[in-house]
Amino acid sequence: MISLLPLLEQSAVAARPSSRCMGCKGTKDEASLDLRQLAAAADLSDAETAALEALRMAKPFSLPPPPLLQPRGQLLWGFMSLQQLAYHYARHHAGYVKALNSWSWMVSTCAFGEWWHAAFAEENPKLHGISLEEAVQLLGSDSPGSNACGQHFNHTFFFATLPGEAHAQKPLRKTAKFLQNSFGSHEAFERKFKTAATGM
């Protein structure tokens, strides 16, 4: 089975300016947060920070590197604070990765319970390199495990596609024309969109 996650990560990296990559040091205009900065912003304890660092090397699923950022004052890209980003990375995303690597609940929700347990006990390496899609198939689409898979995918994709600089990606021709006709300009659309999105 083909895993969509690496393909989407590659697409996200390809869509960025060429000097950017997930988890690498950015250009002089960019900043790469380390886990300790994110942990501090998410108000994690020392023990929680150590657990977060361990998730970076966890198997079979691991927490991707922290995203690259270009801070603009208190908000990142004009719509997200460092605390919001840190909470989503260090609490939400880390929680889903931790859940995926915890075999105890999977045994109760998976028809392959004993096989799953053995794999996590490293008596059987069948799960090493398993894709999220394969995990959902094993667990069933209505299981808590499939939700954790989906949330791991969603958060990885979200962080992989965050722009490193304002307006780094302009819309394609048809979209740009639609925005021009509807709003007067891409910038006017962004202002109206942000006002509507944050004004609720």
Image: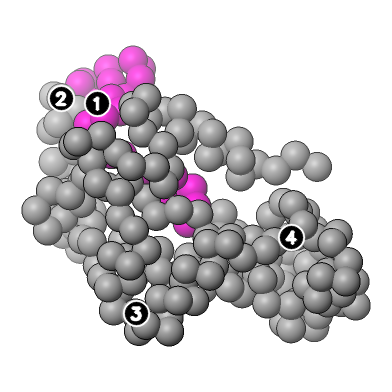
Residue 96 visible in the shown view: no
Residue assigned mark 3: 44
User: Which residue lies under the disc numbered 4?
Assistant: 136
Q: On the picture, is 197 further left or further right than 24?
A: left
Q: Amino acid at mark 3?
A: Leu
For the residue carrying disc 3, how many other residues have a C-alpha within 10 Å: few (<14), some (14-19), or many (20+)? Answer: some
| Distance in Å between CA atoms under marks 3 and 2 | 42 Å
How far is the residue under mark 3 from the one under mark 4?
30 Å
Relative to the observer, which residue lies in front, 93 or 46? 46
Comparing labels 4 and 1, the label whose residue is closer to the camera: 4
Q: Secondary structure at mark 3?
A: loop
Segment colored magenta: 154-182
Question: How far across and down, in percent of the image, does residue 36 sit?
Answer: 33, 67
Measuring 28% from the left and 25% from the top, which residue is drawn there? Answer: 170
Query: x and y percent of residue 121 in the render?
Result: 81, 76
On the picture, is 126 further left or further right than 43?
right
Q: Secondary structure at mark 1?
A: helix
Relative side of 158 to 73, left or right: right
Of tags 4 and 2, the one toward the viewer is: 4
- Residue wearing tag 2: 185
The residues tagged by marks 4 and 2 sit, at their Cα atoms, a distance apart of 42 Å
The N terminus: image quadrant: top right
Q: Earlier in the sequence, mark 4 or mark 1?
A: 4
Classify residue 171 by image quadrant: top left
Q: Earlier in the sequence, mark 4 or mark 2?
A: 4
Amino acid beneath label 2: Ser
- Measure how far apart labels 1 and 2 are at the Cα level: 6 Å
Locate the C terminus and report the quarter of the image it occupies. Answer: bottom left
How crowded is the residue under tag 2: few (<14 C-alpha within 10 Å), some, or many (20+)? some
Q: Which residue is mark 1?
A: 179
In the rendered image, residue 123, in percent from the top left (x then y), is placed at 88, 71
Quadrant position of residue 152: bottom right
